[in-house]
Amino acid sequence: MFAQNWNPIELFKRGEIATMLEGHYWNYNKNKSYRVGQITIGFVKINPKEDFWLLFHIGKVTRDLNVLNGVGYEYQELHEYKKYSGRLIIKFKNKAQAMIRNAESVINDCYVHQILPDIFENEVFPGYEKVHISWEEMKRVLEKDSWKAALQNQKGIYLITDKSSGKMYVGSACGKEMIFGC
């Protein structure tokens, strides 16, 4: 969770890395998260229902700001690993509530799943039966060519749910732009 966002992969997709780094270098009320000189590795869960995590940062703590309940550290990004940020996906089943973990305690449970050829965007259309996205994500993905092509070539019936009220709207798409035109 970063900045009250329960799905922080959306922050990554929108390019809000600074917000993610604030969360990464946050100190909680009672315990300090890191020590000066320590290497930190930041992963964000790609999908809340799956165990795949995307690397978004590797850095080294350079200064302890002695702040609790706030951003507590200055850091230096380790540029030799930058080429893997947004591309390295690991598989890891998180069995603890702790936001910060010591590498020795989890390293044997982490597996490299994939190194993407380019930065993760989740722009590939997943198939009609798997589209369950928020309004914010919909606004972003409708700019992607694979989504446009899929939605401009399909007639259908669709459901929109207002999460705050629970009200549902069922619609039919059969016009010139098909579902994309709705």
Image: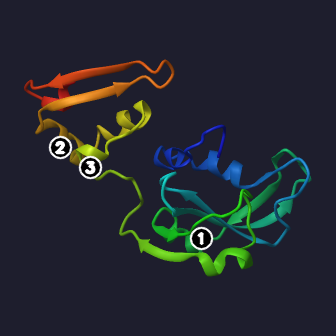
The residue at which mark 3 appears reads as: 125
Front position among marks 1 and 2: 2
Q: Residue at x 46, y 21 (%)?
A: 166
Gap in Å between the C-alphas at discs 3 and 1? Answer: 32 Å
The residue at which mark 2 appears reads as: 150
Q: Is residue 31 above or below residue 169?
A: below
Amino acid bearing label 2: Ala
Q: Is residue 96 left or right of residue 134?
A: right
The residue at which mark 1 appears reads as: 79
Q: Is residue 174 above or below residue 68?
A: above
> Toward which corner of the image does residue 162 lie, by quadrant?
top left
Q: Dot 1 lies on which element? A: helix
Q: For the residues labelled 3 and 2, say whether their Cβ atoms are less than 8 Å apart.
A: yes
Front position among marks 3 and 1: 3
Amino acid bearing label 3: Phe
Q: Is residue 101 left or right of residue 65?
A: left
Gap in Å between the C-alphas at discs 3 and 2? Answer: 7 Å
Amino acid bearing label 1: His
Q: Is residue 67 left or right of residue 115?
A: right
Q: Residues within 10 Å of mark 3 (few under 14, many from 20)?
A: some
Q: Residues within 10 Å of mark 2 (few under 14, many from 20)?
A: some
Q: Is residue 70 left or right of residue 10?
A: right
Q: Dot 2 lies on which element? A: helix
- Quadrant containing the C terminus in the rendered view: top left
Q: Residue at x 41, y 30 (%)?
A: 135
Gap in Å between the C-alphas at discs 1 and 2? Answer: 38 Å
Q: Dot 3 lies on which element? A: loop
Which is more N-terminal, label 2 or label 3?
3
Q: Residues within 10 Å of mark 1 (few under 14, many from 20)?
A: few
Q: For the residues labelled 3 and 1, say whether their Cβ atoms are less than 8 Å apart.
A: no
Q: Residue at x 53, y 45 (%)?
A: 11
